[in-house]
Image: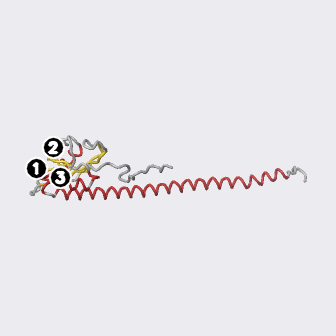
Amino acid sequence: MVGRPARSIRSQLILLVVAVAVPLTGLAAFNIYLDYRTGIEVAQARAEGVAAATASSVHQFLRNARQILETLAADPRIASPDPAVCRMAIDPAASSLPQFQPVVVADTGGMLVCSGVETEVSSIADRRWFRDAVTTGAFTVGDPILGRITRRPVVAMSMLVRDSSGAPIRWWPSSPRARPCCGWSRPTRSPAKP
């Protein structure tokens, strides 16, 4: 063999290892990339599933709240000028639906007529959710706020109470407690002590 130096076995083995290792390294990098993309797609699908379930839960909660308020707003005792009679209408709801505490009834000017809990609050006229409800005349859901009565985060809901001719006479605000993550809160347990 003239003109070409002979390669040693060592250099041939190194070339063979490189020839095998480079494509394997590329294949491994490609698999890592595919795993990453698959992980992102799975996480996105899970997030979409959680969002859909949460939206459905919130929708059902609001539909139930509206039905409860419509039923209570139809009770003629709510329209009574006597706060004791008005309270007789809301006490059963207040005790059987603790998630809707406090339940209050206000006149169209925002002055409280009766309440399911003792309170020093006498007016809700300055609350944005109340003003929105007065303006629209419809079932209204407010933004999360710190409740004046409970001193806890609440989402106020309001329903118009009408007289027999359909004229507005009262507002039925209710303030379900705000819950972490749209109502998906779970009680936490303390770890068992050994």
- The residue under label 1 is 82
Q: Nearer the viewer, mark 1 or mark 2?
A: 1
Q: Is residue 42 left or right of residue 122?
A: right
The quadrant in which residue 76 appears is: bottom left
The amino acid marked with disc number 3 is Leu
Residue 69 spot, x, y in % from top left: 21, 56
Q: Secondary structure at mark 1?
A: loop
The crowd level at tag 3 (other Cα within 10 Å; few <14, some 14-19, many 20+) is: many
The quadrant in which residue 52 appears is: bottom left
Near-viewer residue (114 or 154)? 114
The quadrant in which residue 146 appears is: top left
Label 1–label 3 contact, CB within 8 A: no
Is tag 3's residue or tag 2's residue first in the polypeptide sequence? 2
The crowd level at tag 1 (other Cα within 10 Å; few <14, some 14-19, many 20+) is: few
Q: Work out how far the residue at label 3 is from the one at label 2, CA to CA, in angstroms.
A: 14 Å
Residue 186 spot, x, y in % from top left: 39, 53
Q: Work out how far the residue at label 1 is from the one at label 2, CA to CA, in angstroms.
A: 14 Å
Near-viewer residue (121 or 128)? 121
Residue 136 spot, x, y in % from top left: 19, 50
Is tag 1's residue or tag 2's residue first in the polypeptide sequence? 1
Q: Nearer the viewer, mark 1 or mark 3?
A: 1
Q: Secondary structure at mark 2?
A: loop
- The residue under label 2 is 111
